[in-house]
Image (spheres, grey):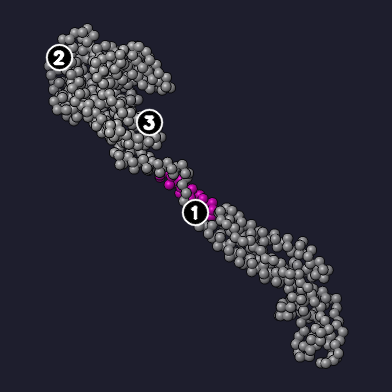
Amino acid sequence: MTHASRYQPLIDTLRRAIGLLQAETDVRLKQSVIQLCDRMVQGDYRIAVFGPFNYGKSTLLNAILGEKALPIDLIPTTGAAITVGYGPTLQTRITLKTGQVITEEGTEVLKRYAILDDQRRMREDVSAVAVQCSHPFLQAGVELLDLPGTDDRDEQNDLVQDQLQTADLVIQMLDGRKLMTLGEREHVRDWLLDRDIRTVIFVVNFLNLMSPEDQKQVSHRLRFVAESFRSDLLPGISNLYRVDALPALRARLKGDMAAAHTSGLPILESALQTVMQLQQPQVQQGRQQRLSVMAREVYRLLEHRTQIRETTLKTAQQQHHDEKSALLLKAKTLIKRGFDNSVRELRNWLIPQNLLSLYQAELAIALKQFDYSAWKTFTLEPTWTERRKAVVSWVHKACDFFERPRPADLWVALPAEPTAEFPSQQQTQASENASSKGVLPVAIATGLGWVVGGPLGATLLGGTSYLLNQKGQGQGAPMSEVKITAEEVDRLYEVAAANYLFRFSSEATAALDAYERTATVLLEACAQPVQSAMSSQSEVSQVQLMRAILAELSLLC
């Protein structure tokens, strides 16, 4: 198994994790992860040179290359990270963020794309700058990285920090005239040590501009600083070198070997060769350690982002729950109020005395005129249907709104058409016999005698029942002729109508009672708290995905 394939699960999980980091503040971390993941599968050995502006970084690299491949000036100019790799000829390749690639011979194009503008800002349209050079050191698999200065602008510092993550060896330039400033110490701690970058070599420049006595004092103090840095260089390899960059470059350009040796450059080059050869077998291990450090940083940030999203989701969920519960409660209250009013109105309408007051006279006339069917169709049925639907409609509204099945409708068949039966001679004889025994006579209507024959019938008939004249008639005497007046006929139809309305009231009220009980249970169930629901399925899925990736990262790093 190759080194890259061994760490591929972590690389894949990290790439998925940074895809979930959407905040603007996460951009730099995402870029760092991408760059470091890309480095895991690259085989070249990268040496990065960094330090403040005017510390001689580009000059040192030009001295190593033996030519002015990189732009140098008294004014700080490097405004991009420039990688220098092997190529048969000196060539520059500029990649813009639009995807356009500009390739030119030489390095003059760097002046247009890799230097700071008049406001000392980096170009925002440049994605990558690469130089190819035919140098034996590069041909051995080394890539040099020239970084912008670190003491000018925040965006340049951000670029430097990101690029340092990809280096296998870091050369930190020091100005012998300034020793090691507080800012440089902070850079060592924050940019290197805290990110597990420990293969660092310090190169002191400008000592040739100082007196011999000052050189000794500075060298002693710098040696103490270098020794205090916990470097991962192999035993016997120093992490502090003196190189006078500009004299070294001049010597190389002139081919002056003695002057080059005096500048300290050959000693540094020899150390770099040794470090590269000895460290190369452990390069992937070092990269993996940095990748693990970054993975833990991604884990902490993603965990924080996930907690925020879960809290936001829970708040939105609770708000949605409260709003929906309030809406449902309001709807239930309005529906229940409407239902109760409709039931009360229907129940009041079904009170026997109210039905008698409204319909007894009309129904009696309809019966007398054999027009019951028309009366039922155009008088009672429309009103009954309208009032019944008024009750049922509220239940239907509740079922539709609360998404519940509808119960059976409130319904009862109207009683059969009443038929009044007038007294016959036999009934008259029976009345006479009953009268002789002190029993009150009873008016009979077909199918309705159960009402008329009782106390209620007596109340309705009053003193105008169909009493037959029995005066002078004794038991066993011949039956007298049936005598009945028009008023008594009207009263008989009124009694038949009353009994019909009483039966309708009884049956309809019983049906209403049963329907009200069913509807009350249904409406109470509608008032139960609703189940909490997430704001949207996409948000739920996003949180679940974040948790799954966090679990993977926890296992891999």
Sequence-wise first label, 2 or 1? 2
Identify the residue under disc 1: 530
Q: Quadrant of the C terminus?
A: top left
Q: How crowded is the residue under tag 1: few (<14 C-alpha within 10 Å), some, or many (20+)?
A: few
Q: Give the magenta range.
A: 309-329
Residue 326 percent location from the top left of the image: 52, 52
Q: Amino acid at mark 3?
A: Val
Residue 115 percent location from the top left of the image: 35, 16
**Residue at left offset 28%, top offset 31%:** 2
Q: How crowded is the residue under tag 2: few (<14 C-alpha within 10 Å), some, or many (20+)?
A: few
Identify the residue under disc 3: 27
Sequence-wise first label, 2 or 3? 3
Tag 2, which secondary structure?
A: loop
- Does the magenta-highlighted stretch encompass residue 315? yes
Task: For marks 2 and 1, give the CA distance.
Answer: 85 Å
Q: Amino acid at mark 1?
A: Val
**Residue at left offset 40%, top offset 41%:** 545
Residue 445 appears left or right of 193: right
Please name whichever residue, 460 or 278, is drawn nearer the observer in this view of the structure.
278
Residue 356 percent location from the top left of the image: 74, 70
Q: Amino acid at mark 2?
A: Ser
